[in-house]
Amino acid sequence: MSLNMQPAADGQQFSERRQPPRSDTAARAVHRRDFCRGMLGAALTVASSSHAWSAEESRRWSYVLASCMYGTLPLNDILPEVRKIAARHIDIWPRVHGNQREQIEAMGHEAFRRMLEKHDVRVGIFTRYDLGPFRIDDELAVASEYGARLIVVGSSGPRGLRGEPLREAVRDFVRRLEPQCRLAEKHGITIGIENHGNALIESPDSIRWLADFSRGRPLAVALAPYHLPQDASALANLIRELGDRLGHFYAWQHGMGCHKKLPKQQELLQMPGRGPLDFTPLLAALKRIGYAGFVEIFMHPVPRGIPILETAAEVTAEINRARTYLDGLKV
């Protein structure tokens, strides 16, 4: 299926459509805590970074650190690493990829808040593939309390569809998410749907239709290049087409995959600057659409739940190597 195919533009016929996408100002008004503190925005791509970069640093992306990159290491060991990768935000993952979400419940929310304050870190994302898209009501409230911008989940629905049946399935998926979208809007949170292999939202066309049907809702694409054809030009075109429907970007390539145990150097080919994918066109496309959301340097280890490298220091060094590559690209 070609990445250059366009979905039918029938978004205005969607009977449940609400108001057009909110402006940056309106989005911040919804999330009064962000408005008062001036830290976080709730809009999809106009949410401003909370980094206090100097003028020479202003070209940097708004990086977020995935807790699962450190396996099941304690949050007290992971949080000090956030600022070391030029980030202020963490993405909290549950089992099986990590267990930091479970750690929060075990220690208690007040203890976690104190830990965040100690390390001057904020929660940017709660990733909850374990809950699925229709069981996130309680987690939206938790995310709001921490001032998070996103909850990232997978899609739900039939698989292996193409053409009109796929389009209708994506439309139905968005309709069924209406209660969660209303609640997300109330809390000032965006629901990010990752494109994932063997899922409803998998192909470029399904991603485009999700973007089209989600307009006017706090619902966006969490784009994972790993799960798409590794054609940099086509991926860049897709980013430009998504525009303000792009709510999250994983700096993650396929490399040699993440389902079979491989020598570590081959496993690491998922990381930016190691595998063959040239991220230059992708970042240029992000820049062109004015993307201001999070960039998450990412990979999966085999098996899940272990750190990508043996120690926290090694994991951070590898993320910084990838960040140096991304920051050095001429876009």
Image (tube, rainbow, N blue to C red):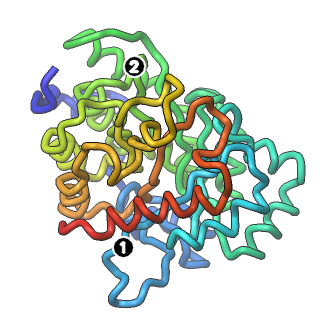
Residue 90, numbered label: none
Q: Height in image: 81 above or below 54?
A: above
Residue at 28% from the left image edge and 24% from the top image edge:
203
Residue at 45% from the left image edge and 46% from the top image edge:
218
Q: Quadrant of the C terminus?
A: bottom left
Q: Quick check: 15 left or right of 136?
A: left
**Residue 258 or 52: which is nearer the viewer?**
258
Q: Quick check: 93 left or right of 48?
A: right
**Residue 188 or 222: which is nearer the viewer?**
222
Give the mark, 2 or 1, whose residue is nearer the N terminus: 1
Helix, strand or loop status at disc 2: loop
Helix, strand or loop status at disc 1: loop
Residue for badge 1? 60
Q: Height in image: 307 above or below 12?
A: below
Q: Residue 220 location, x and y as percent?
A: 39, 43
Q: Height in image: 257 above or below 92?
A: above
Residue at 24% from the left image edge and 12% from the top image edge:
162
Q: Residue 202 location, x and y as percent?
A: 35, 24
Judged by depth in the image, the label closer to the viewer, 2 or 1, is: 1
Q: Residues within 10 Å of mark 2 (few under 14, many from 20)?
A: many
Residue 200, numbered label: 2
Q: Quadrant of residue 139?
A: top right
Q: Residue 80 location, x and y as percent?
A: 69, 69
Residue at 55% from the left image edge and 58% from the top image edge:
65
Q: Residue furthest bottom?
A: 55
Q: Quadrant of the N terminus?
A: top left
Q: Residues within 10 Å of mark 1 (few under 14, many from 20)?
A: some
Q: Quick check: 329 left or right of 49?
A: left
Q: Disc 2 residue type? A: Leu
Q: Disc 1 residue type? A: Arg
